[in-house]
Structures are given as C-alpha cells and as structure tokens.
Image (cartoon, grey):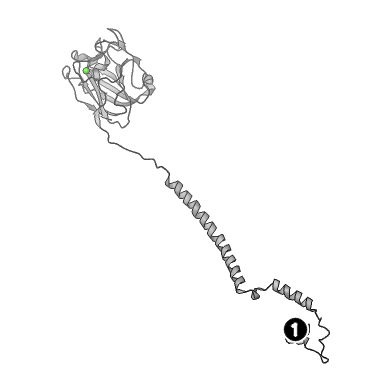
Amino acid sequence: MPTVNELFYPYIPQFQPGPTGEPTPAIKVLSSSEINTDLNKLHEIPSSNSLSLSNKLLIAGGLFLCVCTAVVVPVFITHYVNQTRSTTTNTTTVPTTTTRALNYTQVTLAGDPIAGIYNAAYGGSSTNSSAGSNTAGTYPSTENPPNCIDSNTNTKYLNYGANFDGYNTGFYVMPQVGSSIATGILFATGNDHSERDPITITIEGSNAAASLLSQGSSWTLIYNGSTGISPTVDPGRSTYVQQQNFTNTQAYTSYRVLVTSVRTASNGCCVQYSESRIYGYV
Ligand SMILES: [Ca+2]
C-alpha cells in the first residue's frame, strides 16, 4: 500500500515536501486505512458526472418508463371509456313511426252493434229505445235500428219518440271496422208516409267505451245539417238522396245520429228512414 505522500505529492501542491522533506504541518496526514475508507465511500456515492455509460442507460430507461406510464395509461383509460360509451350509444334502439294511407269506404255495415235511442239532443244524454207498438220511445220490432245500416232500401227503422213525432230520436253505432274518420252520410227514404221523412240531423263522434255511450259527455259534434232529403220536394219512396259530406279530421270508434226535424212536425206518429249509412276514412 502506498503512503500518503506517495499518493498526493505528485498532484497537490500543498503536499509538496518542505525544505526538510516533510509535508506542511496544516495538512493532516491520513493513514492508509482512512484513505481507503474514504475512497470506498467515494465509489459508493458516485456523482452524475462519474456515472458509467451503463448506469446512465439504466437511469434513462427508468425515466422513459415513468413518462410512458404517466402518458400512455391515462390515454388508454380515456380511450377505453370512450369505447364503452360508444358501444352504449350504438346499441340504443331508436323508435320509428310507421304510416299508412287511409281508405275512403263505407264505415257502417250490416251487423255493426247499434242501439235505438230517444229523448236525445246533441251534447245531451239519451234514453235507450226498445221494441214496442205505438208506445212512446219504442220502435216496431220489425222496423228496428239495424235496418237503417243494412244497405237495403226495403227495410226501415221507425221510432215514435217521446211525443209521437220522431224528434230527438235516432241511434248510436259502433262500426266493426274500428276507428274511422267520418266525413259523409247517405240517407234513403222509407217505403211510405213522406210526412215521416227526417229533414235535419246531428252526427257526433265518440271514443268512449260502449257502457258510456248513453252519456252526453261522451260525444263530440261533427255535423249539424241536412239529411239530403228536401223539406219541400218528396224524393220518392225507398229512394236514396244526395249524400251529405262534411269536414272532420278526428277519428272515432262510435257515432251517434239524432233527428232534429221531420218533414211534418206534428205527424202524430214518428220518423222513419230505410238507410242512414256513414262514410269516411278507415
Ligand atoms: Ca235498410
């Protein structure tokens, strides 16, 4: 092992030997073991400038991994979340609305449920008629309500009404075609007694249940006018007259037809007609 002087004299001026050949007194002379200990400590804690190339590469590699972890992981998480959201959006079902063309047709047909009524003005409640003979509010059993929608002018519906004049009588019908938009009505006269011809009527529509159709609040007025039968000229017996058309855009499942005037107001009997068919869009 070299001595202190041998180690430092060549490099440090302070350690140059004095005139007597000894080191300057201010300088502590270290033993060989102390010097080796300090040198080992210097090796254990190398400065950055003294790092070997392999250590520098290791540190650089570590820094690179840290940067990648800090940048790539958040990007990956964001991408994964976005992908999840995108998948959820793509699986959403969008409701669609289908439409179809409406067909103009005869709305009321033979066999439709129909009820004779009296004591009824539009907007008001009604009383059910029943089969009878010369009795207020009834109709002859063979001249019943279904006869006015059977497309047969040889069959008729007659109602005496509350005062034997046929006023405020009529029927309500539930067409089996289902919901429809009524826009017209076609009348045909009875086989006799022109003084019993209906001259004016109202038509109302309803979407209420059958059990509620005797209540006035169930109905909405859609027509108030002529039957197409002239009040002054007899069109003939068992005869179709001009169909009456009106504007209506609402669909209904039931209709109510009420007679508001008869050719002869006090005819002492009734009102009668062989057909009263509703037309419209289904
Ligand atoms: Ca008929």
State whether residue 137 appears in this view. no
Seen from the viewer's position, the closer of residues 57 and 272 is 57
Q: Is mark 1 within 8 Å of ligand 1?
A: no
Q: Residue furthest bottom?
A: 19
Q: Residue furthest front?
A: 1
Lateral position of residue 20 relative to residue 79, left or right: right
Quadrant assignment for the C terminus: top left
The vertical placement of 31 against 137, above or below, is below
Helix, strand or loop at mark 1: helix
Seen from the viewer's position, the closer of residues 34 and 91 is 34
x and y, in percent, of residue 278 in the image: 26, 25
x and y, in percent, of residue 14 in the image: 77, 86
| Residue under label 1 | 7
x and y, in percent, of residue 181 in the image: 29, 30
Q: Which residue is drawn at 24% across and 31% down?
A: 104
Within-10-Å neighbours for mark 1: few <14, some 14–19, many 20+: few
Q: What is the tally of numbered marks visible in this picture? A: 1
x and y, in percent, of residue 202 in the image: 29, 23
Lateral position of residue 75 relative to residue 234, left or right: right
Q: Which amino acid does label 1 sit on?
A: Leu
Seen from the viewer's position, the closer of residues 217 and 79 is 79
Q: Quadrant of residue 167?
A: top left
Q: Quadrant of residue 124?
A: top left
Seen from the viewer's position, the closer of residues 89 and 155 is 89
Q: In which quarter of the image is residue 180?
A: top left
The vertical placement of 199 against 249, above or below, is above
Q: In which quarter of the image is ligand 1?
A: top left
Quadrant assignment for the N terminus: bottom right
Q: Residue at x 48, y 52 (%)?
A: 82
Q: Which residue is drawn at 21% across and 26% down?
A: 243
State whether residue 218 appears in this view. yes
